[in-house]
Every structure is written in C-alpha cells, then in structure tokens.
Image (tube, rainbow, N blue to C red):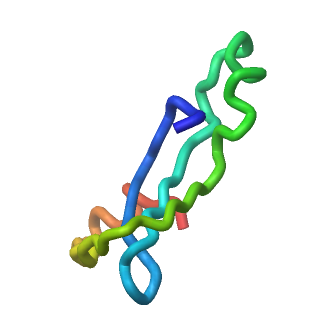
Amino acid sequence: MPVLNVTSCVFGGKDLQTLYITTASECISHDRTDLEKLAGSLFSYKLPIAGTKSNLYRYKFNNKHRNTLYSG
C-alpha cells in the first residue's frame, strides 16, 4: 500500500472479487505528509479469486448507555 495507516478491508462487488481498502489521514506527522499524499483514500483492487461476505454485527445498547456512548 502507498500509505501506512490502513483502517479496514472488505470484499465487494456482485462477484466478491473486488477488495476495498480504507485508509486514514489523521495522525500523520508533518514530515510524512509529502510521502503520504494518498492517505485517507479508498483503494480497490480486482482479484482473480472471490472473497467471502462480511459477517454483520449488531450490538444492542440499552437506553442508559446509549447517551453516554453517542453524542447524537
């Protein structure tokens, strides 16, 4: 990858042969900003094989904790 801070990867597309990779641009030191011009970008790569579907995860918050974890 042309950046250091990869945040997530997931297979997508109707055939699951595209790998999507997200990156972050936060917390990059000033001396690296010229080297990391693509930081914060979304990358995609077409692969010769198919990946697997992601598992969905749902966490149930009770009302007592919901307001302390989210500001909205």
Asked if residue 44 can be seen in this view, the reply is yes
Q: Judge from the rendering whether residue 42 lies leftward or rightward of residue 31; answer left or right.
A: left
Residue under the point 28% across and 67% down: 64
Residue under the point 45% across and 46% down: 7
Residue located farthest toward the front when viewing the structure as drawn: 48
Asked if residue 58 can be seen in this view, the reply is no
Residue 55 place in picture, x, y as percent: 22, 75
Residue under the point 64% across and 37% down: 25
Q: Quadrant of the C terminus?
A: bottom right
Q: Examine the image and state in which quarter residue 50 appears.
A: bottom left
Choose between 32 and 27: the one closer to the eye: 32
Q: Compared to 27, does 48 lie above or below?
A: below
Q: Judge from the rendering whether residue 31 lies leftward or rightward of residue 28; answer left or right.
A: right
Residue located farthest toward the top when viewing the structure as drawn: 31
Could you tell me how many numbered marks the image carries? 0
Choose between 31 and 44: the one closer to the eye: 44
Q: Judge from the rendering whether residue 23 lies leftward or rightward of residue 7; answer left or right.
A: right
Residue 36 place in picture, x, y as percent: 68, 29
Residue located farthest toward the bottom when viewing the structure as drawn: 14
Q: Examine the image and state in which quarter residue 29 appears.
A: top right
Q: Compared to 53, does 42 lie above or below?
A: above
Residue 46 place in picture, x, y as percent: 49, 67
Residue 39 place in picture, x, y as percent: 65, 38
Residue under the point 43% across and 89% down: 14
Q: Compared to 48, does 8 lie above or below?
A: above
